[in-house]
Every structure is written in C-alpha cells, then in structure tokens.
Image: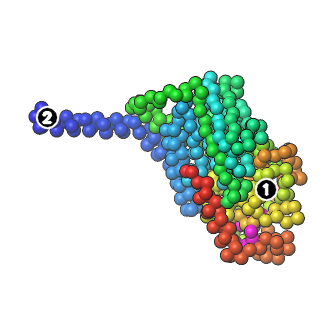
Amino acid sequence: MSAPEAAASTSEAAASTTVAAASTTASLQEAIAEAEQLIANPPFEVNAQELAEGYDYLAGSIRSSLQMAFDYDLEHPVLINPTHQYARQGLDNPDAIYFNAYLADGASYVVSGRRGTTTDLSFQVMDGGYTETGHPKTLAAFDDRELEVAEDGTFEWRFGPELGIRKGSTLIIREVYDDWNTEERGTIRIQRLDTAGQPRGAFSQDRVAKRYGVAAKMLVGRVKTWFAFPEWFTYKEPVNTLTVPKSTPGGLASQFSSIGHYSLGEDEAMVVRVPVCADAPYQAIQVGSKWYVSTDYEHHQTSLTAAQSVADRGFFTYVISERDPGLANWLETTGHDKGVMMLRWQRLARDLTAEDGPQVEVVSFDSLAQRADLDHQRVTPQEYADRIEARQVGIARRMIS
C-alpha cells in the first residue's frame, strides 16, 4: 500500500470511528439538551440562585443516570449508590445512604452483609421505578428487625420469584443515621444465585449504545418525575402547614412522615414544635428547594435528627428562617424564600397519630429573641460553627460517592 493510500485508509477509519461515536452518544446528547430546557423553564418561578442550583441538579442527574445505566447488570447485579450530596433527587434524606439494584424476572438472590451501628437499615422491592405518572407498587418492605442477625452482626436474606419480581423490578436499601459522628456503616452486597461464577460477556458497540440510550431515558424521566411528584402530595397542602403524620407514600415499611411547603419573608420565621417520639429510634426534619431536593446539608444546617437536636420538656422546637436566630435548632433556608419540608419517623413500634405530629406557627423574626420557650437552645456564633464542623466531618466519614 502506498503512503497516500495508507493515509486515506487511516482517514476513513478515523471518520468511521467518529460517526460511530456520535451515533453511540447521540441519544444522551439529545436527552441532555431536552433536560436542560426543562431546567431552564421549570413549572415554578426561580431566582438566579435557584436557576444555578437547577443546573447543578442537572449535573447530578446526568451523573446518576450514567451510573445507573452503566452499572446496570441483570446477570451480575451490584448495589449502586445513585443518590447523595452530588446527585440529589426526590427530597433525598440527608441521613440516608441509598443503594439500588435491578432485578430479573424469575431469578433468585441473596443479600448479605454485616450490620453496622446505624439507627435503621431497611429493604424494599418495587415493581418498577418512580415516573411522572405515578409511583411503583411495593412487593416487599421491611427493616433488619425481621432478619436473623448473628452476634457478629452478619445477616443473609434470600428471595426470588415468590415476591412477584418482574422486568423492571428494583431493590432499594436505605441505611439511615441518627448520629452522623458516632454510628458506623455496615457492609452489604447482592448476588444473583443462578449466575454466580459465570463471567460477564464482552463489550460490544450495540451494548454500549443501548446503555447510553438507557441513561438518556432515565435523565429526562428523572427530571419530569420530580417535577410531578410534589404536585401530587406536597403542594396540595396549604402553604406554611405540615400534615398529620402518615405512612409514607411508596411503601417504606416502618416510616411515617409529615410534609409541607413554606413561603417566608426575610423578616419572618416558622416555628415547628413536635413531640420527642420515644417509639421512633429515628426522628428527623429537613427543608428542601423547589427542585424537590435536599439543600446543602453538609455546610449548612438544613436538616436535623433527634441526636442533632436540642429537646426541652419532651419537645423539639425548630425555627425555619433565612436569618440566623442564634438557636441550636435553626434550619437554614439558604436563600430560598419558598421550599418544601418533611419530618420523618422510622423504625416505629406503633402507628403515629395527630398528637405525635408537628404544630406550626409563622412569627416575626424579631419576636424570637423574646421567646422563653427558645432560651434552652440559644448558642453563640462559635458554638454554631462547631455544629457545622461536626456536620462536615459526619458527611466525610460516610461519603462513598
């Protein structure tokens, strides 16, 4: 082959590779463009900060969608951590580590590991994923109290077709902290029994292209889903209220929740008073943004568990505001005059009633300084800074993203 012929051949090969690469990723490129338009034109008003947060949310959604698509393996499933401080969705719980795995119709599995010291460890099998048209049916839901946990903390759960698993079914595991700085994560894994020991197949262009297509579908669906979800539940409630505790939609077995949304001026504050629940080892409150995601819980106090809260005479009293009231139980709105709220109780020993739920009042910010019921939790700027440092350390201890 002459030099000109070799050069032409090389050029043709390069062009062919470029075309293949473009067609392989085209679906994801189109989905990113569509998702960007959804973020740029959300079904609610946003200020400049919130729009910037929307694009950060988009980046996390792209990341999570790629992770879910390329870690996807029905023959050799793995536990994927798709939701964390860099990939938020669905008013994610700041106290939880989430794990997901895809399940195959007719297959059998073993989930095993060693129980850590986190307050809760729960398991849920769903017959699909959340979509903009609804949430999936729960096929199984329980926490580790239903497992046989050995003295050394090890456990094993075997399940299969008896649960009604079908194409699209997923396993969700939540490991939930009360005290970020003392509780320790456990270990956990999943194995499909009938494919154990079999090697994974080689990569092919079609296989990779299909996964880009899956990521594309996930990305757009994810953004649309979490636009729709709060409209079904949260925004049906009157503003500046919280609901009576109810079993959480979606089938999480041992969780009750109270939901709401707020709208506060800079000179206003919301005071939330809720009983300490002795029958709930995990009790927490958080605020979130219009994107229906958690706000920065690592560097700001936008959530509090019972262990992180100061109680007085059997109650937690929280203050939600933009300005700093000098209180231990302050929930920072971080530039969001409107947002969502949620209280959670997990690992319950009984159903909750209205008496277990929150009482809410909107007051002037200046009136907080004169309230005797808040005197027990007044803190100095340094004491509050220490609380933020503890949050930063707590997140670093468990971060696996």
Q: Nearer the viewer, residue 28 or 153?
A: 153
Note whether residue 228 is visible.
no
- Quadrant location of the N terminus? top left
Residue at image mark 1: 241
Residue 361 disc label: none
Q: Is 8 colored magenta in this rendering?
A: no
Q: Could you tell me which residue is drawn at 61 percent across and 57 percent down? A: 397
Q: Which residues are magenta?
A: 318-328
- Dividing the picture into quarters, in which one does residue 188 lie? top right
Tell me which colouring the rendered structure shows: rainbow
Compared to 398, does 131 lie above or below? above
How far apart in space, not on screen, are marks 1 and 2 (Cα)? 75 Å
Residue at image mark 2: 5
Circle 1 — which element?
A: strand
| Predominant secondary structure, magenta span | loop
Q: Could you tell me which residue is drawn at 67 percent across and 24 percent down? A: 161
Q: Nearer the viewer, residue 303 or 265?
A: 303
Q: Nearer the viewer, residue 389 or 325?
A: 389
Q: Could you tell me which residue is drawn at 57 percent across and 51 percent down? A: 400
Q: Is residue 298 left or right of residue 215?
A: right
Note whether residue 59 is visible.
yes
